[in-house]
Image: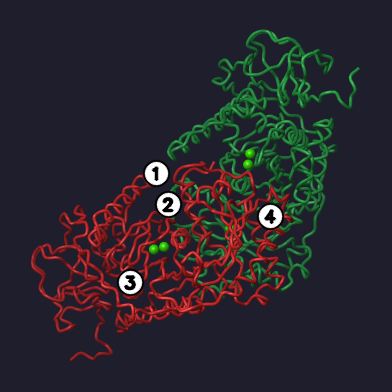
Chain colours: A red, B green
């Protein structure tokens, strides 16, 4: 028997898999997992757990990453020399792997302590928001929030989590119709109605392209006790606009402060899945562990949103197979085609193929690479596909089309209604968000230790033998606690006032 | 003699003009400017000051706005019915109207009290800056600035105007080369070296597309006592990064605080011309008055930057004629062609033609409309054309290609080195900027009175008879005082922490 303390470590990501990953280099002749390794397997690379016949699928994450090009012996190194993709990458196989998901019976479904809103949605936080239609009103929004902060609102109204100015760089110098305008409209609408806001004031300059009056008309918004709008020009300048906002918020604060959390079913959680600053461990530790938590949430009737289209590009077949219906799969493919046109007209191209560095690190195919990112979404059936910032209404596992860039991706998901974010990072992102709390998962122990004050959970211990199932349950437990009010690291640090970045599509004029 | 109190008001914008504008409706048979009006001239429309022969140029702002289509009688209404453009709009006439400008003799040139920097440039303010390479470090920059503010830096170091976090929404999820990347590089370089900063700390996350190490290599930047860089990932998280920044700034503060203003020639002023929220008066009052001030600054050897390419589109002939050389004119035309491609690939088109509303208000041709915007640039010879955020090195009147959108346009001009901004507004912009002070000129008395706390000068009194020359001198005097330290309205209100918006070109991925 090899000494367990010095034996090379290996990781099998799913019980269905016929390959495992060597976490340490496997020398020729070494014995692991009951096999003798016929030839050296570099660290991070894969080896066969059993004989694989010529043409048979190679399974990692329980899913196909390629097909054997020739028979593969047990223990053999598996990489570009003996893996092919055939025509898999041209077959969307819509809904081929769809499963009728069986949620837990109601009595077994969990609960969290949330803020039930009058529109039927549930918040995990209780903020007041100051939305802005244009950069030209950003400072006024901030002045109003700072004024109330200085006046001690936090102490007088401890039931309110804070007053959040939602500022950005766009809203004018843009076409008044088309994709760019619609994306901004949906985003602001999603924030205006977000359940983590008890009430919202929206402020514009007055002459901007993004007209608040038009916005209200298009979405059928009325001025209410919890939604008020104004413009700096109508008010007669900065000071009066700030006074109007602080006056409105002072009227809103007592009612917001009186709101209490109540026990709500986990089906009211909408989880945004995110990764940023990925590394070679993302696909082995934090992402699959988050996938376990996502599947658990789906079993409890909740919603989980995978996004970041550029990172699944070229491997959309993995999701179309899992689509609940052909229509869902086709909507995803339509977004893929849109991205090809978007990058082409901007002089670039979509390419998520493994780079030479990826391949040296052990990633063999585009499917394997994208599965590392998509592993966050677990293995649940894909119930719906949304465009950026569209309201997410389907339960279960869904996809929202966003860029991979973290603040832009998260802004779209939050606009869609996400009341929780779970963010994996290998390089060490410091991301935080308001009004939605963001939990950060380190993919490796080194980054967790270096950035402990920014990281909520270390998933690096998966490499030391902590089972993915147990790690996923740990994440799930924290999700429920954070949904119920426990502060994340990024909340304790004060993040979230600078990370609202709506996707800007189109010319700035 | 008509009663001067009730006589209709008229405005002639240049002594060269053969038309004037009716500020009040001129009834048939009324007498103004020594003429009898043969037929009604609506308010805001033009009338002939003398007989104009068929085909002769119509001059407003001292420049050609079109040609008489048939002979025009003195006092006659001049509009689309009797004005044509012929082929003027296809003739760039490069440098046809260039003049060798004669600056004032050195002993007659004015001075201001500025901060002379070691790189030979001169600041009008003395800030410390915290630059960010990416949105992912925006919060850290703000935390550091807030920390020092709470610690009372303002009281201990009264010679420093403040600590400015320069945050934005981009820096990652973008192509690592090409126009978008270069624009961001130039912009950050321009801020990093801006003379209104005594010293700068630049902070990144670490894994972003915009790598600080590459930026330093490309611009040959060294770490010095007044320029330091770091990343959150290298420091080991948010708290340590904030400590690093505040520590660096604490070391920089005493030297910055010790700097004193000294008398410097006005040739060291670089004025950014801006307008936002324009109205029908912009081209009659604030813009031409600012043009007078711009010409004065040029006579004193200073630099004045006109921008906002979409607003001169279709009337670039006005600037190519004034270009110092054919090469300068051709560079402008190249940018015009670039804009046509930029908007086309984004599904739009360039169009600055007078709208039906413009025409009803009295604007006859695209030349006249664009002259209203370009009037800010006075009548000086165009010495150079710059791309967005390029360092402005030529003295005199220059053009920088920017969008019209205020924060994006001003960000490019400031990156180019502008140490003053003068901003005209008719609807009532509340714009402010750091590190460059922004003077706001109201185009009409009504907006000035409604937003007095935001407006530095009322140009509406030009309509009441204040000569443009005198208004221009009033603006020029304020420019010099503000350059020497007098606070603008937007500075008193605290603007400038949310208005850094680099031009984002290309796909967000
Ligand atoms: Ca990612
Ligand atoms: Ca991301
Ligand atoms: Ca900002
Ligand atoms: Ca303008
Ligand atoms: Ca503008």
The residue under label 4 is B435
Which quadrant is the C terminus of chain B positioned in? Answer: bottom left
Residue B485 appears in the picture as rendered? yes
Q: Residues within 10 Å of mark 2 (few under 14, many from 20)?
A: many
**Residue A477 at x, y percent in the picture:** 40, 81
The residue under label 2 is B175
Marks 1 & 2, CB-CB < 8 Å contact? yes
Q: Quadrant of ligand 5?
A: top right
From this view, report whether residue A342 is shown above or below residue B164. above
Q: Residues within 10 Å of mark 3 (few under 14, many from 20)?
A: many
**Residue A305 at x, y percent in the picture:** 37, 64
From this view, report whether residue B93 is shown above or below residue A399. above
Chain letter belonging to callout 2: B
**Residue A244 at x, y percent in the picture:** 70, 58
Question: Measuring 58% from the left and 52% from the top, which residue is drawn there?
Answer: A133
Q: Marks 4/2: CA distance? A: 28 Å
Which quadrant is the N terminus of chain B positioned in? Answer: top right
Q: Nearer the viewer, residue A493 or A416?
A: A416
Q: Marks 1/2: CA distance? A: 10 Å
SS class, disc 1: loop
Q: Residues within 10 Å of mark 4 (few under 14, many from 20)?
A: many
Q: Which mark is residue A298?
A: 3
Question: Measuring 46% from the left and 67% from the top, which residue is drawn there?
Answer: A121
From this view, report whether residue B179 is shown above or below residue A303. above
């Amino acid at each position: 028997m090899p000494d367990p303390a010095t034996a090379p470590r290996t990781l099998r990501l799913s019980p269905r898999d016929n390959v495992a990953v060597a976490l340490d280099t496997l020398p020729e002749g070494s014995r692991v997992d009951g096999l003798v390794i016929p030839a050296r397997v570099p660290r991070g690379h894969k080896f066969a757990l059993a004989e694989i016949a010529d043409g048979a699928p190679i399974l990692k994450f329980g899913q196909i990453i390629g097909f054997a090009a020739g028979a593969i012996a047990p223990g053999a190194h598996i990489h570009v020399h003996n893996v092919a993709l055939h025509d898999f990458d041209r077959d969307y196989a819509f809904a081929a792997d769809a499963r009728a998901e069986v949620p837990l019976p109601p009595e077994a479904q969990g609960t969290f302590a949330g803020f039930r809103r009058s529109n039927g949605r549930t918040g995990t936080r209780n903020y007041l928001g100051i939305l802005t239609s244009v950069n030209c009103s950003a400072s006024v929004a901030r002045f109003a929030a700072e004024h109330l902060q200085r006046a001690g609102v936090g102490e007088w109204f401890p039931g309110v989590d804070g007053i959040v100015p939602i500022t950005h760089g766009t809203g004018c110098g843009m076409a008044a119709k088309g994709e760019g305008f619609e994306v901004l409209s949906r985003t602001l609408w999603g924030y205006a109605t977000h359940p983590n806001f008890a009430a919202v004031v929206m402020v514009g300059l007055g002459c901007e392209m993004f007209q608040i009056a038009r916005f209200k008309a298009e979405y059928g918004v009325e001025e209410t006790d919890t939604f008020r709008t104004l413009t700096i020009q109508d008010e007669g300048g900065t000071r009066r606009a700030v006074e109007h906002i602080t006056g409105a918020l002072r009227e809103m604060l007592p009612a917001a402060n009186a709101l209490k959390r109540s026990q709500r079913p986990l089906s009211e959680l909408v989880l945004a899945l995110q990764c940023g600053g990925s590394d070679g461990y993302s696909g082995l530790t934090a992402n699959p562990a988050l996938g376990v938590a996502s599947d658990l949430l789906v079993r409890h009737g909740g919603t989980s949103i995978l996004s970041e289209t550029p990172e699944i590009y070229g491997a959309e077949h993995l999701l179309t197979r899992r689509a609940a219906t052909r229509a869902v799969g086709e909507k995803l493919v339509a977004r893929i085609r849109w991205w090809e046109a978007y990058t082409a007209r901007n002089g670039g191209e979509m390419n998520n193929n493994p780079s030479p560095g990826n391949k040296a690190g052990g990633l063999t195919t585009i499917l394997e690479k994208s599965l590392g990112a998509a592993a966050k979404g677990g293995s649940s059936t894909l119930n719906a596909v949304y465009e950026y910032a569209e309201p997410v209404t389907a339960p279960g596992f869904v996809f929202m089309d966003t860029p991979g860039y973290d603040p832009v991706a998260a802004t779209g998901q939050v606009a869609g209604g996400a009341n929780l974010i779970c963010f994996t990072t290998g390089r060490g992102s410091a991301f935080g968000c308001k009004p939605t709390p963001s939990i950060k998962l380190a993919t490796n122990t080194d980054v967790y230790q270096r950035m402990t004050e920014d990281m909520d959970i270390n998933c690096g211990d998966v490499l030391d033998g902590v089972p993915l199932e147990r790690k996923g349950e740990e994440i799930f437990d924290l999700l429920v606690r954070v949904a119920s009010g426990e502060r994340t690291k990024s909340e304790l640090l004060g993040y979230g006032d600078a990370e609202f970045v709506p996707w800007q599509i189109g010319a700035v004029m």
